[in-house]
């Protein structure tokens, strides 16, 4: 089935996370959309009941599109740690608690990895991007970036688990990298390239 193309105009980004919103807005900048966040519109965050990144991205996009009668883009992303059998995965944000304390979340990752006794530090970031239209049509893609974890956390750039993640082929953590350098290789950029090919180009 042919993918539906996303025309210009107003686009709701279904996120209340300022860091994530900033990255997505920068990725969308070349396409001329009028971007507005779900947080700015006062939309409630739907409960993430999906069992995968794609399912959670889709439910957030659909909720925002139906609430605003506008196309909506949603992201669901997280960190998968090999030594923890893929955790925290879709629960990455929830590991940070209601206060979004990612310092505590990164420390939990460190402790749980240490408890396994394995030297394996490999991990990957995963990002699912979903665009939903008010009529219920949805297009979803998924991207990732592989790497390994380092402790203690390094760098104040980015957000979330960025200060402990080093992408394959690099020495700096995402928290230490210039934002433009991170955007070029991140899981979100990988997913966005796939989304661009599917719905943003004629």
Image (cartoon, helix red, strand yellow):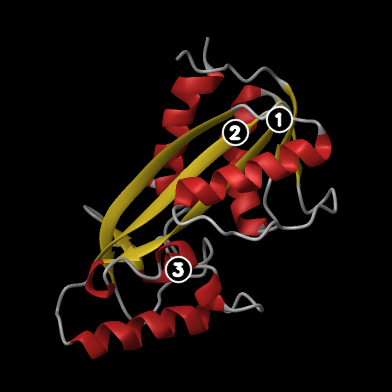
Q: Quadrant of the N terminus?
A: top left
Assign a secondary structure to mark 2.
strand
CB under 8 Å between callouts 3 and 1? no
User: Rounded to the nearest whole Å, what is the CA distance between mark 2 and mark 3?
Assistant: 25 Å
The percent position of residue 184, horizontal first and vertical second, equals 41, 41
User: Rounded to the nearest whole Å, what is the CA distance between mark 3 and mark 1?
Assistant: 29 Å
Residue 36: quadrant of the picture: top right
The residue mark sitting in front, 2 or 3, is 2
Residue 79 visible in the current orientation: yes
Assign a secondary structure to mark 3.
loop
The percent position of residue 144, horizontal first and vertical second, equals 35, 47
Residue at 41 percent across and 84 percent down: it is 108
The numbered mark at residue 146 is none
Residue 47: quadrant of the picture: bottom right
Pick whichever, 10 or 63, lies toward us: 63
CB under 8 Å between callouts 2 and 1? yes
User: Rounded to the nearest whole Å, what is the CA distance between mark 2 and mark 1?
Assistant: 7 Å
128 relative to 91, above or below: above
The numbered mark at residue 161 is 3
Badge 2, how many Cα within 10 Å: few under 14, some, many 20+? many
Query: Counting residues from the N terminus, which is met first, the one under dot 3 or under dot 1?
Result: 1
Residue at 34 percent across and 83 percent down: it is 110
Query: Counting residues from the N terminus, which is met first, the one under dot 2 or under dot 3?
Result: 2
Circle 2 residue: 131
The numbered mark at residue 71 is 1
Residue at 42 percent across and 57 percent down: it is 177
């Amino acid at each position: 089935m042919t993918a539906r193309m996303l025309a210009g105009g107003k686009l709701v980004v279904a996120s209340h996370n300022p860091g994530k919103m900033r990255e997505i807005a920068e990725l969308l900048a070349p396409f001329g959309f009028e971007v507005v966040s779900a947080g700015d519109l006062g939309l409630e965050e739907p409960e993430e009941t999906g069992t995968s990144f794609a399912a959670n991205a889709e439910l957030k996009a659909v909720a925002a599109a139906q609430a605003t009668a506008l196309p909506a883009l949603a992201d669901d992303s997280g960190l998968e740690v090999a030594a923890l059998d893929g955790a925290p995965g879709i629960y990455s944000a929830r590991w940070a608690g209601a206060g979004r304390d990612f310092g505590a979340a990164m420390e939990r990752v460190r402790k749980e990895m240490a408890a396994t006794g394995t030297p394996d530090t490999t991990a990957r970031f995963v990002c699912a991007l979903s665009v939903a239209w008010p009529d219920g049509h949805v297009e979803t893609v998924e991207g990732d970036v592989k790497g390994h974890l380092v402790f203690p956390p390094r760098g104040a750039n980015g957000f979330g688990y960025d200060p402990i993640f080093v992408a394959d082929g690099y020495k700096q953590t995402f928290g230490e990298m210039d934002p433009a350098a991170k955007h070029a290789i991140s899981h979100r950029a990988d997913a966005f390239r796939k989304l661009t090919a599917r719905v943003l180009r004629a």
